[in-house]
Image: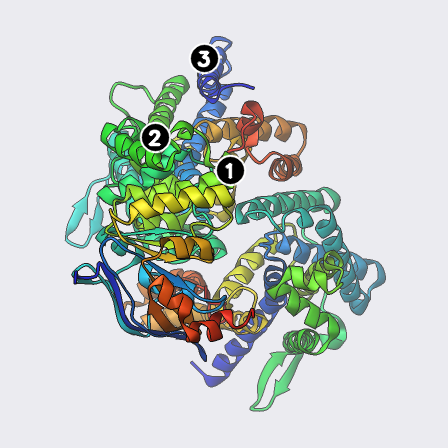
């Protein structure tokens, strides 16, 4: 196995992880601030992808498509928050799981109703397609590299937002004490809608960005949603730093596991069996990772200790 | 002098930089009520947590009867004979009053593994439960759902559940909390009798009740016992006045 | 308002009546639908013990459903190919006998529930929901990549397995078998709920601190409830596979875990007949709305949303006027 292949796979894992981070950041923010488990986060990812594919189809502009994904998902998120979610903040986790599970059904079937069951396609724009040569002579797709860059920018932006701005201070205060910040005169329900819409917008953006390298179809959100949950559980629910580290861990584990586990097992087993067992293990790897983390630290790597 | 039923030896606990318990040694002798008082934030909850399990001390030990229970879990301490009541009622609100007390009786027997015969037909268990309810005066409401009880009744039920365990010693966290004058009175009378069955470590804010009940009082300030003695000694203690009452005068 | 006992009796009687009527008017497909509802109800009864009494929100009960299904699939697959299973030094022959398959399904699921429970019960709240979900996904992906038993395509069994004294190929007889299993499970649940174990478990759900301070270990109580729960759901999995004569990784999918919870919530969480009503309604909706529109899940979603937001006790809660246990 060449070093180039290894680096390529590491970059792939990184890119996957960064996209998971866009999903996980919203989830963990929503959980941290409002205490809500939102299974419908994957639906907002799908909404973003469909919005992007439609706008790109109509205008031909990828940039406009991304803007559409961001705004439509934010808008959908705000509506969902106002109509359904805000009734759930004080409800039990079970109710939150069920109500947002119901939202998945409604979103998925609604989208199928409007767009049909066939996948849509969103093309990588010409100025971002094709490979670039990295130092060391590695050829890597420019678009994927852009994704990594965009994701890191978002991470930086989120850090700036929560650590350096007035609204970020309100958000962090809301995590600690709802009554207190309400008493300080912050309109808490507006703040919640805003946080939810922000999380939704990030999910929508991720959907559009990934939609360009995969197909845009109903049901695309759920596998990503579950991985995003794995990410925030590993990182510790509520922690954005945890989400970033968890996302990269999961991205790398998933990508590298698929390549290296079968190879690794070939050292001990005959080739056919190694490939079989290796790929089976690799597909379970992130879940095994999560279980191990939880058994070791029941509230995740950066979660608050009870 | 008789051997203490419950004792702590040099308990210490810090949270980050905050000293919550500082070298606390207290004991509880047969037949007595030993009250722990102190201003808010003195470390009473942390101390109870270490005595009853749930909070692990950094140093020191907890003894119940002849055994060192420092490394026992909460459940094992209860098995060893520690009965506890909570400041904020921890009752099964959806269940009936009787079912709540049954929990205590089952806990004492340590046999929750009966899967087939109906709990409400287990004569022996029901009889012990009803006896506990009689004593606190809740027998008539035994079939009511706990959520429908008044606050005072919940406090009584809280005590009945602990009674059902027939413990060697009680640890009671503010049993008077939220009771009216009349409720406090009858609770005071009840605890006064109860001490002869098993001694009580009483954490309480209601000073009238403490002065009426306590055989001994220990004053906890910033995690440290600053004074310990009879009611009169504590009332007269200068140290206590400064540290505790001083803030008010 | 109606007493819950009457509702339970009416529900079970109605459940029995529908396939009998279908038999008389010669509508065999309705019998199959009723069997499907009975089997899903059985799976949900299993989950209801963990969820409704123990308060364990498991989003991974498909693990046990799938294990039951694959227990049936693998044993029957080896029987129809006449190839024994080689497990190291052990050689096990396949079988078409339902009692043996059921026993295997129950034992395997109970064992899996023991291991998963031991690991998962270290966590609580959202983390518990997520770790059970993760275990579900592990089994799902494992079954997809395990090509010896069909991988993604699943396993087909040509002829339904046999039960002594019953012709399982006749729909109404197979329904009878499944319905009996459901009734037995319901009986077990009602005894369990009224027993000392049930009482203590139910209290531990509401106030775990109290259970500990009276000397009980809530973790052990919950673990046992989880094992019993998994075993019943596993049995349902074996029956479900036999009903379809097919097992596939979808039996392990997280959507299935979600649907099992949905069935319980629609009917009434912790209520004896909750899963039965929920499952009957679910299968009816699936069939009739499914005929009327391709997008019936929207309506399911709306119903579910309304129940969660406005009718906490589910249908039984509405009928009896009493809120169920809070999970």
Q: Residue at x 47, y 72 (%)?
A: B241
Q: Residues within 10 Å of mark 1 (few under 14, many from 20)?
A: few
Give C259 or B131, whichever is nearer the viewer: B131
Q: Is residue A294 visible?
A: no
**Viewer-side residue, C10 vs A218:** C10
User: In the rendering, at what x and y percent does residue A209 appear?
Assistant: 68, 66
The part of the image, by quadrant, that contains residue B161 is: top left
Chain of the residue where label 3 is placed in the rendered structure: C
Q: Is residue C240 above or below residue A77?
A: above
- With C114 as the anchor, is C88 left or right in this view? left
Q: Is residue C121 above or below residue C82?
A: below
Residue B230 is tagged as none
Instruction: Give residue B56's quadrant in the image.
Output: bottom left
Left or right side of A138 for C198: left
Mark 3 or mark 1: which is in front? 1
Q: Nearer the viewer, residue A255 or A125?
A: A255
Q: Mark 1 and mark 3 in contact (Cβ < 8 Å)?
A: no
Q: Nearer the viewer, mark 2 or mark 1?
A: 1
Query: Which residue is disc 1 drawn over?
Result: B150
Q: CA distance from mark 2 to mark 1?
A: 26 Å
Q: Chain of mark 1?
A: B
Dot 3 and dot 1 within a common chain? no
Q: Secondary structure at mark 2?
A: helix
Q: Residue at x 49, y 11 (%)?
A: C21
**Residue A111 percent location from the top left of the image:** 71, 46
Question: What is the distance, in whole Å, between disc 2 and disc 3 at their CAs?
Answer: 32 Å
In the rendering, at what x and y percent does residue A101 appear? 59, 46
Helix, strand or loop at disc 1? loop
Residue C194 numbered mark, or none: 2
Q: Residue at x 70, y 74 (%)?
A: A161
Give me the disc on residue C20: 3
- Left or right of B98: which side holds B66? left
């Amino acid at each position: 196995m060449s070093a180039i292949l290894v680096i390529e796979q590491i970059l792939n894992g990184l890119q996957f992880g960064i996209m998971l981070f866009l999903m996980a950041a919203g989830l963990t923010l929503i959980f941290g601030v409002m205490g809500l488990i939102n299974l419908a986060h994957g639906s907002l990812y799908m909404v973003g992808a469909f919005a992007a594919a439609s706008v790109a189809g109509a205008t031909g502009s990828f940039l406009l498509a991304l803007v559409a994904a961001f705004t439509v998902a934010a808008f959908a998120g705000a509506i969902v928050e106002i109509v359904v979610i805000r009734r759930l903040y004080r409800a039990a986790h079970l109710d939150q799981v069920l109500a947002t599970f119901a939202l998945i059904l409604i979103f998925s079937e609604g989208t199928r109703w409007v767009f049909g069951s066939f996948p849509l396609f969103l093309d990588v724009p010409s100025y971002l397609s094709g490979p670039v040569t990295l130092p060391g002579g590695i050829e890597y797709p420019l678009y994927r590299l852009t994704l990594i860059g965009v994701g890191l920018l978002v991470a930086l932006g989120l850090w700036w937002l929560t650590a350096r701005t007035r609204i970020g201070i309100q958000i962090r205060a809301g995590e600690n004490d709802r009554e207190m910040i309400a008493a300080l005169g912050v309109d808490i329900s507006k703040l919640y809608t805003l946080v939810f819409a922000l999380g939704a917008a990030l999910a929508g953006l991720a959907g559009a960005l990934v939609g360009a390298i995969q197909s845009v179809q109903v049901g695309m959100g759920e596998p990503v949603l579950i991985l995003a949950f794995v990410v925030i559980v590993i990182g510790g629910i509520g922690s954005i730093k945890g989400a970033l580290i968890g996302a990269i861990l999961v991205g790398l584990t998933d990508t590298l596991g698929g390549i290296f586990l079968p190879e690794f097992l070939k050292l001990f087993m005959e080739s056919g069996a190694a490939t079989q067992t290796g790929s089976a293990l690799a597909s379970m790897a992130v879940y095994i990772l999560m279980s191990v983390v939880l058994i070791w630290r029941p509230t995740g790597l950066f979660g608050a200790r009870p | 002098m008789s051997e203490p039923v419950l004792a702590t030896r040099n308990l210490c606990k810090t949270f980050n930089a905050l000293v919550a318990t500082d070298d606390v040694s207290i004991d509880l002798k047969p037949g007595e009520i030993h009250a722990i008082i102190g201003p808010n934030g003195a470390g009473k909850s942390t101390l109870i947590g270490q005595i009853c399990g749930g909070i692990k001390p950094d140093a020191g030990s907890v003894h119940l009867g002849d055994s060192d229970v420092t490394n026992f879990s909460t459940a094992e301490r209860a098995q060893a004979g520690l009965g506890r009541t909570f400041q904020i009622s921890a009752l099964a609100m959806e269940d009936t009053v009787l079912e709540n007390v049954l929990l205590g009786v089952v806990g004492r027997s340590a046999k929750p593994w009966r899967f087939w015969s109906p709990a409400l037909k287990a004569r022996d268990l029901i009889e012990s439960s009803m006896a506990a309810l009689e004593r606190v005066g809740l027998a008539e409401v035994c079939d009511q759902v706990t959520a429908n009880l008044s606050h005072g009744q919940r406090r009584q039920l809280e005590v009945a559940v602990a009674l059902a365990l027939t413990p060697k010693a009680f640890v009671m966290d503010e049993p008077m909390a939220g009771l009216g004058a009349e409720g406090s009175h009858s609770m005071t009378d009840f605890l006064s009798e109860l001490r002869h069955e098993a001694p009580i470590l009483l954490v309480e804010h209601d000073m009238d009740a403490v002065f009426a009940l306590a055989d001994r009082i220990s004053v906890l300030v910033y995690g440290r016992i600053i004074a310990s003695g009879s009611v009169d000694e504590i009332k007269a203690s200068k140290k206590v006045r400064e540290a505790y009452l001083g803030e008010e005068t | 308002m109606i007493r819950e006992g009457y509702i339970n009796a009416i529900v079970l009687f109605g459940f029995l009546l529908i396939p009998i009527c279908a038999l008389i008017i010669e509508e065999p497909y309705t019998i199959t639908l009723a069997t499907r509802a009975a089997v899903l109800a059985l799976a949900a009864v299993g989950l209801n013990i963990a969820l409704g009494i123990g308060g364990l929100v498991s989003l991974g009960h498909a693990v046990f459903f799938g294990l039951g299904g694959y227990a049936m699939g693998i044993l029957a697959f080896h029987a129809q190919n006449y190839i024994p299973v080689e497990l190291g030094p052990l050689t096990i022959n396949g079988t078409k006998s339902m009692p043996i398959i059921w026993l295997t399904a129950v034992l395997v699921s109970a064992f899996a529930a023991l291991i998963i429970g031991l690991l998962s019960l270290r966590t609580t709240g959202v983390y518990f929901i997520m770790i059970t979900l993760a275990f579900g996904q592990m089994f799902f992906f494992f079954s997809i990549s395990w090509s010896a038993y069909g991988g993604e395509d699943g396993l087909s069994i040509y002829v339904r397995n046999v039960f002594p004294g019953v012709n399982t190929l006749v729909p109404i007889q197979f329904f009878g078998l499944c319905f009996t299993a459901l009734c037995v499970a319901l009986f077990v649940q009602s005894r369990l709920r009224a027993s000392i174990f049930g009482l203590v478990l139910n209290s531990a759900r509401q106030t775990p601190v109290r259970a500990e301070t009276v000397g009980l270990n809530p973790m052990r109580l919950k673990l046992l409830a989880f094992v019993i729960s998994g075993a019943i759901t596993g049995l349902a999995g074996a029956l479900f596979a036999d009903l379809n004569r097919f097992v596939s990784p979808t039996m392990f999918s997280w959507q299935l875990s979600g649907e099992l919870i949905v069935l319980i919530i629609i009917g009434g969480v912790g209520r004896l007949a909750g899963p039965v009503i929920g499952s009957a309604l679910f299968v009816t909706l699936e069939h009739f709305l499914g005929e009327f529109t391709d997008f019936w899940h929207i309506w399911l979603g709306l119903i579910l949303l309304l129940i969660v937001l406005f009718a906490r006790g589910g249908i039984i809660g509405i009928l009896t006027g009493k809120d169920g246990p809070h999970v």
